[in-house]
Image (cartoon, helix red, strand yellow):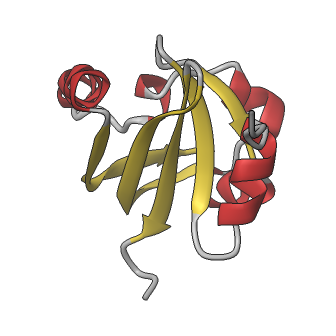
Amino acid sequence: MRRRPSPPAILDAAAALYRPRGADSFGHHVASNRAAQRLTGFSRDEIVAMSVIDLTQPPSAEDGRQLWAEFMTEGEQRGAYDLRRKGAPAIGVRYWAFANVAPGVHVSLLMANTET
C-alpha cells in the first residue's frame, strides 16, 4: 500500500503557488505554512488555534458556515471570500479546497485576488 504524504508535506508542496492551510472535519486548522502566515499576519500557533470560520471576515462568517457544510458534503469547492488578517484590513482571496487529502484532513489553497 502506497503511503500518502503527511498534511504538512502536502502544504509545503503547494506553497510555491498558493497559501495553503489544513483543517480537520470540524473546521479547526491542523496545519499552516509560512506563506499562509504571511498572508494573514497570524503565527502558525495562532492559526492552528483558530477555525476556518475564525479567519472568515464578518459579516461573511454565516456564509462561511454554509460553505463549509457544502464543502464537507461535496468534497471539493472553489470560490472567493474575504480573509481576516491580524492588524490589517481583510483581503479578498480565491480558494480551492479539497476534502480528505489524508483521512479527516482537508486542504485549502488560497491566493490573494491581487496575485496573478
Up-down: is 55 above or below 25?
below
Q: Tell me which corner region of the image, top left, top right, bottom left or bottom right, holds residue 67.
A: top left
Q: Tell me which corner region of the image, top left, top right, bottom left or bottom right, holds residue 47.
A: top right
Residue 36 in view here:
yes
52 left or right, relative to 65: right
Residue drawn at (74%, 29%) of the image? 46
Q: How many marks?
A: 0
Residue drawn at (53%, 41%) of the image? 107
Residue drawn at (71%, 60%) of the image? 38
- State the residue in front, 52 or 58: 52
Name of the residue lying farthest toward the top:
26
100 left or right, relative to 68: right
Please state the horizontal and vertical placement of residue 12, each as a whole percent of the image: 77, 57
Please state the horizontal and vertical placement of residue 92, each as a whole percent of the image: 35, 61
Please state the horizontal and vertical placement of residue 70, each as a whole percent of the image: 19, 26
Name of the residue lying farthest toward the front:
1
- State the residue in front, 88 or 67: 67
